[in-house]
Image (spheres, helix red, strand yellow):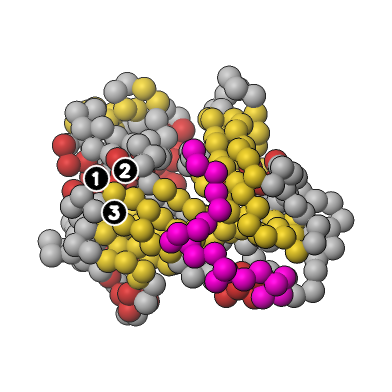
Amino acid sequence: MSGVRQQVVARDEDGMRLDRWFATHFPQITFGHLQKLIRTGQVRVDKARAKTNTRLESGQVVRVPPVEDAPEKAAPRIISGDAEFLRGLILYEDEDVYVFNKPHGLSVQGGSGTKRHVDGMLKSLPNKKGEAPRLVHRLDRDTSGCLVVAKTKAAAAYFGNVFKSRSARKIYWAIVAGNPLPKQGRISCFLAKQATTDGEQMVVVANGDEGAQHSMSYYSTTDTAGRRFAWVTLKPVTGRTHQLRVHMAQLGTPILGDPRYFNIHNYEPSEGVADGLHLHARRISLPLRNGGRLDVSAPLPPHMQHTFDALGFDASRYDAQDTDPEDEA
């Protein structure tokens, strides 16, 4: 059992999330155990409390509490078919990065009871140094679409800073219950995590409340199916947990199939509307290390395409590369 150590964040780790930093240096610490260490204040960054998604800066000092020394490093467990599965999801690839079309229902990272997830499968796509690609942002398990994964440590640090600086442009498509009023606008509020009987969820709180974090999104109504449904284009400015789901519920037009935030009582489902969360990371645009710009769009998942067809929405009318309706920040 090692004692408390103070470890300096390396230059090529600038922008890395704290949980990924721990996974790199202390793989023996499970994600659940790390959450407990952070929650109890045993892990600190420059003597201040931190969160699992805290972005580190080179030169910062991370306090690491006593942990069991890592066992002999074994070869990563690779399940047959993982590489083929992931390659089938690739929307874009270069020497630095993959963009995957993450399916609805697939977790990005492990957690309680989650055995199959993108982060685990990435071991099947090692780079030239034998290192697994690294996640640089997240999507909820039931949100489909564009997921950016860095191939190297240096690329992960670069893209971590891109997301931290908000220079990544993200466009989501959703189908909501009702019609947003006004048809387009901005949602700005403070969110905090709240414990529930089946985990944690985000709630709207006042500025200054414990754990409050500012959140902001732009939305625009793309099309409607009467007064019961709307196809909405969403542009998150901040990146809080469940942000878009909470924002649309707060507006009174929750996203279809949302098991946690759908807040219309005695709601009667409509024939032809598929099951599942109707939220899709349609497009991602961000600067590349070579000075170019990545701009990728993901096709709708099957359940959302089914609902689009049932409601008469035509995704082909709106080329995501050029004419996505949105408010500019």
Tell me whether the residue at label 3 lies in contact with that at label 2, contact meaning CB atoms closer than 8 angstroms: no
Indicate the quadrant where residue 133 lies. bottom left
Magenta residues, as a range? 309-329
As helix, strand or loop, the secondary structure at mark 3 comes to strand
Q: Is residue 79 something one can see in this rendering?
A: no
Location of residue 175 in the rendering, given as x and y in whole percent from the top left corner: 66, 60
Q: Is residue 217 something one can see in this rendering?
A: yes
Indicate the quadrant where residue 266 lies. bottom right
Tell me whether the residue at label 1 lies in contact with that at label 2, contact meaning CB atoms closer than 8 angstroms: yes
Tell me which secondary structure the magenta stretch mostly adopts: loop
10 Å neighbourhood of mark 2: few (<14), some, or many (≥20)? some
Q: Nearer the viewer, residue 216 or 242?
A: 216
Q: Which callout, 1 or 3, points at the residue further toward the start of the chain?
A: 1
207 displayed left or right of 285? right
Mark 1 vs mark 3: in front: 3
> Is 206 situated above or below 14?
above
As helix, strand or loop, the secondary structure at mark 2 comes to helix
Mark 3 vs mark 2: in front: 3
Q: Which residue is mark 1?
A: 158
Q: Which residue is mark 3?
A: 293
Q: Which residue is mark 2?
A: 162
Real-space Cα separation, disc 1 to disc 2, in angstroms: 6 Å
Q: Nearer the viewer, residue 63 or 94?
A: 94
Location of residue 251 in the rendering, given as x and y in whole percent from the top left corner: 71, 42
113 displayed left or right of 6? right
Real-space Cα separation, disc 3 to disc 2, in angstroms: 12 Å
Q: Amino acid at mark 1?
A: Tyr
